[in-house]
Image (cartoon, grey):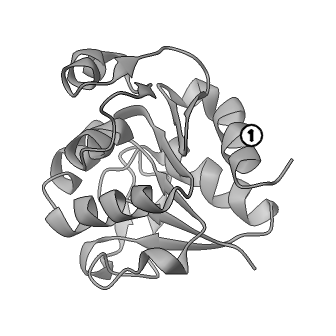
Amino acid sequence: MKKALILTGKQVQDHEFIYPYYRLQEAGFQVEIAVRNKETVMGQLGAAKIVPTQDISGLHVEDYDVLVIPGGAKCQEYLRQDQEALDFITKFNATGKPIASICHGAQMLISAKVVKGRRVSGYYSIKDDINNAGATYVDEPAVIDGNLVTTAHYKHLGPWMKATLKLCGIQ
């Protein structure tokens, strides 16, 4: 069975966690959730109570086939300060396995230094951050560049996850 990892934290954008969580399960993935200290957290809207299966400490890249980074400005403000999380993303990217990022999740890609020279989408307010990190900001429902699949907004959850699953070899 293929395994997916959702890397997140407190104040995640609820839609951006819930939809990929269930969509990946529907596609046959075992979905694990990593939060620092395996702390149960709530989404920013209060719709998602997230009970993690993993701590960010001790994650192994080889255990997963796809990495999903949901957004939420407050969530990313804290999570991008977690060097272990950033190191995990950098190592995961080096394998070429799919990484799906939505909204402010692109800030994790920036801080992990995996966007330079690539086409990337993210929430509109971080367009300058994406460009300043050496990427080219693109506003499309699903932006694919190598192993990255990014999008700006939860209104594009469908096309974004469809592109992610396609990169995983699932039509």
Q: Nearer the viewer, residue 134 or 17?
A: 134
Query: Which quadrant of the structure image shows residue 159?
Result: top right
Image x and y of residue 72, in percent: 34, 40
| Disc 1 crowd, CA 10 A, few/some/many (<14, 14-19, 20+) | some
Q: Residue at x 72, y 54 (%)?
A: 23
Residue type of the residue flagged with mark 1: Lys
Image label count = 1
Compared to 72, does 32 lie above or below? below
Residue 22 shown left or right of residue 68 in the figure:
right
List the residue tagged with mark 1: 162
Residue 160 shown left or right of residue 43 in the figure:
right
Residue 30 shown left or right of residue 8 in the figure:
right
Q: Residue at x 45, y 67 (%)?
A: 50
Q: Residue at x 25, y 46 (%)?
A: 76
Image x and y of residue 40, in percent: 35, 74
Compared to 125, does 18 lie above or below? below
Q: Residue at x 32, y 24 (%)?
A: 135
Compared to 46, does 83 lie above or below? below
Q: Nearer the viewer, residue 57 or 78?
A: 57
Query: Can residue 78 be seen in the rendering of this structure?
Result: yes
Q: Secondary structure at mark 1?
A: helix
- Looking at the rendered image, the quarter that the N terminus falls into is bottom right
- Residue that lies at the very extreme toward the right in this rendered image: 171
Image x and y of residue 107, in percent: 27, 38
Q: Nearer the viewer, residue 48 or 28?
A: 28
Image x and y of residue 32, in percent: 54, 74
Query: Can residue 51 be seen in the rendering of this structure?
Result: no
Q: Nearer the viewer, residue 87 or 55?
A: 87
